[in-house]
Amino acid sequence: MLVSIGLFYLLVWAVTEMTQQAFIIDALDAYYRPGLLGADSDAERTPSS
């Protein structure tokens, strides 16, 4: 019984982590996409480090 409760909460945690990662990817895409689409050359598309 205790193992099944632990596995259930592990599943809940895994789903929330996957959702968080999806939101982060979506937010970063919305932040960078306008600049990427508006770039005229490959040099502007490549991040400078």
Image: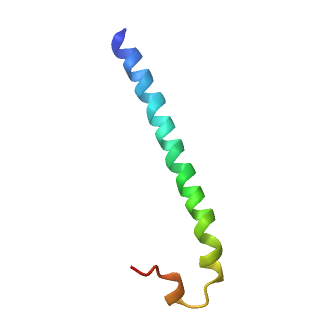
On the picture, is 34 further left or further right than 11?
Answer: right
Q: Please say if 3 is above or below 18.
A: above
Point out the image quarter for the N terminus.
Answer: top left
Q: Residue at x 35, y 11 (%)?
A: 2
Task: Name, please, the residue furthest toward the top.
Answer: 1
On the image, the x and y values in percent for residue 32 come to 58, 70
Q: Residue at x 61, y 85 (%)?
A: 39
Q: Please say if 24 is above or below 18.
A: below
Q: Please say if 23 is above or below 46.
A: above
Colour scheme in the image? rainbow
On the image, the x and y values in percent for residue 44 come to 53, 86
On the picture, is 24 further left or further right than 2?
Answer: right
Task: Name, please, the residue furthest toward the front.
Answer: 49
On the image, the x and y values in percent for residue 36 come to 59, 77
Task: Name, please, the residue furthest toward the left.
Answer: 3
Q: Give the mark count.
A: 0
Q: Please say if 17 is above or below 13.
A: below
Point out the image quarter for the C terminus.
Answer: bottom left
On the image, the x and y values in percent for residue 47 come to 46, 79
Q: Residue at x 52, y 44 (%)?
A: 20
On the picture, is 38 further left or further right than 3?
Answer: right
On the picture, is 22 further left or further right than 49?
Answer: right
